């Protein structure tokens, strides 16, 4: 189903609460961003997975791959879903954002949005498991896309941040419990984008 973007088209919402997110544009310069993006697009073993939604198997409209510590299980049911081992480039990015986040991340989900048809629908990153992903650090390379936020109890309370090439966004503690987020489909022409969400799964 097509997701219509009814949020602002430019920059962070002026009144986005500071307790929800930190946003740092240009944490990685253009050369770094282009290097990482091309490296990830060309070298990662991307997969397109299916998920159960409303009783039906649905193919996810983007490509993904997990990396992390060897003892991390990123499955919801504990069904032995183990990540691939960190690459040099992922560790470089991880070491740059951890001082900003104030935590040591144990895994990262990479998302490859090939064009405006690729998206992720409204969700929270804690998978309904208390304590999972209480802090999430997001790094974006490539095409700018809007990161939309809405309150779980009142969907009329909503904000948007334009995630720029080389930017960093931190979803702070408490964010996953009270808020949902998405990357909506776009009718505008969109170039490729790679997003990394660093997580605390344990």
Image (cartoon, helix red, strand yellow):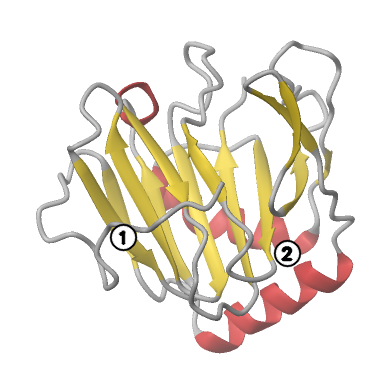
In this rendering, the label closer to the viewer, 2 or 1 = 1
Label 1: element kind = strand
Label 2 Cα crowd, 10 Å radius (few <14 / some 14-19 / many 20+): few
Instruction: State left or right for residue 130 relative to residue 169.
Output: right
Mark 2 or mark 1: name the one nearer the start of the chain: 2
Q: What residue is rendered at 28% in x and 56% in y?
A: 160
Label 1 Cα crowd, 10 Å radius (few <14 / some 14-19 / many 20+): many
Q: CA distance from mark 2 to mark 1?
A: 26 Å
Label 2: element kind = helix
Q: Nearer the viewer, residue 126 or 108?
A: 126
Q: Position of residue 81 (x, y in %)?
A: 83, 24
Q: What residue is rendered at 39% in x and 55% in y?
A: 147
Residue receiving disc 2: 89
Instruction: State left or right for residue 96 relative to residue 81.
Output: left
Instruction: State left or right for residue 160 relative to residue 110.
Output: left
Q: Nearer the viewer, residue 147 or 176?
A: 147
The image shows residue 198, relative to residue 76, as above or below, that is below
Q: Which mark is residue 117?
A: none
Instruction: State left or right for residue 118 relative to residue 136.
Output: right
Count of labels shown? 2
The image shows residue 166, relative to residue 76, as above or below, that is below
Q: Position of residue 50 (x, y in %)?
A: 79, 35
Q: Nearer the viewer, residue 187 or 91?
A: 187
Residue receiving disc 1: 161
**Would you identify the image quadrant in which residue 164 lies?**
bottom left
Q: Which residue is situated farthest in the bottom direction here?
A: 31
Q: What residue is rendered at 41% in x and 56% in y?
A: 4
Q: Position of residue 187 (x, y in %)?
A: 50, 71
**Would you identify the image quadrant in which residue 42 lies?**
bottom right
Q: Nearer the viewer, residue 55 or 68?
A: 55
């Amino acid at each position: 189903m097509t997701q219509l973007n009814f949020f602002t088209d430019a920059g962070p919402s002026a009144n986005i609460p500071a307790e929800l997110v930190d946003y740092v544009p240009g944490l990685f310069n253009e050369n770094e961003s282009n290097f990482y993006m091309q490296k990830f697009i060309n070298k990662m073993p991307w997969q397109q997975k299916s998920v159960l939604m409303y009783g039906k198997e649905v193919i996810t409209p983007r490509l993904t791959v997990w990396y992390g510590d060897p003892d991390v299980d990123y499955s919801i049911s504990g069904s032995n879903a183990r990540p691939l081992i960190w690459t040099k480039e992922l560790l470089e990015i991880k070491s740059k954002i951890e001082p900003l986040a104030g935590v040591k991340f144990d895994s990262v989900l990479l998302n490859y949005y090939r064009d405006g048809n690729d998206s992720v629908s409204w969700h929270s990153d804690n998978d309904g498991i208390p304590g999972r992903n209480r802090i999430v650090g997001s790094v974006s390379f490539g095409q700018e896309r809007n990161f939309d936020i809405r309150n779980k109890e009142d969907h009329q309370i909503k904000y948007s941040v334009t995630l720029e090439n080389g930017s960093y966004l931190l979803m702070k503690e408490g964010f996953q419990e009270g808020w949902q987020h998405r990357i909506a489909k776009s009718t505008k022409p969109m170039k490729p984008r790679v997003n990394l969400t660093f997580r605390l799964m344990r």
